[in-house]
Image (tube, rainbow, N blue to C red):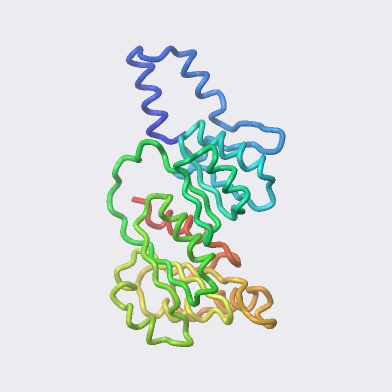
Amino acid sequence: MRAEQLEALLADVAAGRLAPHAALDRLRHLPFEELPFARIDHHRALRQGRPEVVFCEGKTVEQVTVICGRLAAMSDSFLGTRCSEAQASALAADFPRMAWNPVARTVFCPPLEPAAATPDTGTILVVSAGTSDLPVAEEAAVVAEAFGHRVGRLLDVGVAGLHRLLAAGEQLRDARVVIVVAGMEGALPSVVGGLVAAPVIAVPTSIGYGAAFGGLAALLGMLNSCAAGVTVVNIDNGFGAAAAASRICRP
């Protein structure tokens, strides 16, 4: 439940439009809701400003649909990452307004009523080194957009053709936070970190040949960046990068 929903519920009780027992029934699962296979944290939006996000990978179609359905029942909305096509198809049957992004593997059902306007917090710019990094980069972009931020995309600007990155200097400088997604040797965040004043969140991907070790080479390269202001999340963790960027941009 979002803060504005709770405030409206309390206002209805205070004005006599809603009986206290009816309000209590709606709040019964507010701390968390226990299911046979999950404990859904309906209180997270009040604690952290963002609701619980469903990690769909490893869950059955039924588990995903039930969890997302309970989230929607409490807050009119849900966001899921690492969602398969079968899971997305089942959700779309129940939630026609849901958006499925097959590249990012995300599902997002927006609230029926848009959130109140917030102060402009700038642009989160998602930069990807290569086209093969797009699934992780797009996951970061979709999550940041679902969290209500303005998002820019700068694609296929890896260090093998550095002129492509330098041509986007204005876009880089205007960003409030830059998320840089790269595999192979993971050099791009260091280059971006040396060009901008904004915080840089580096995301190593599992893209690369054998010695890339499934993204470990990129991860170690980013952790050893000589550029100040670069921080690193886990391999392929576009969601984590977007969540961190959102907190940086919080008004």
Is residue 220 placed above or below 149 in the rendered structure?
below
Query: In which quarter of the view is residue 185 placed?
Result: bottom right
Residue 134 place in picture, x, y as percent:
51, 69
Residue 86 position (above or below residue 15): below
Numbered-mark total: 0
Q: What residue is drawn where x is 47% and y is 39%?
A: 77
Residue at 53% x, 29% y is 30
Residue 215 point in image, percent of width and height:
63, 74
- Vertically, is 223 above or below 85? below
In the image, taking residue 210 as reference, residue 116 lies left or right, namely left
The residue depicted at 60 percent of the width and 67 percent of the height is 235
Residue drawn at the location 50% of the way across and 22% of the way down: 26
Counting from the top left corner in percent of width and height, residue 228 is at: 44, 76
Q: Nearer the viewer, residue 241 or 115?
A: 115
Toward which corner of the image does residue 156 lie, by quadrant?
Answer: bottom left
Residue 133 percent across, percent down from the top left: 53, 71
Q: Nearer the viewer, residue 249 or 73?
A: 73
Left or right: 84, with 238 as reference point: right
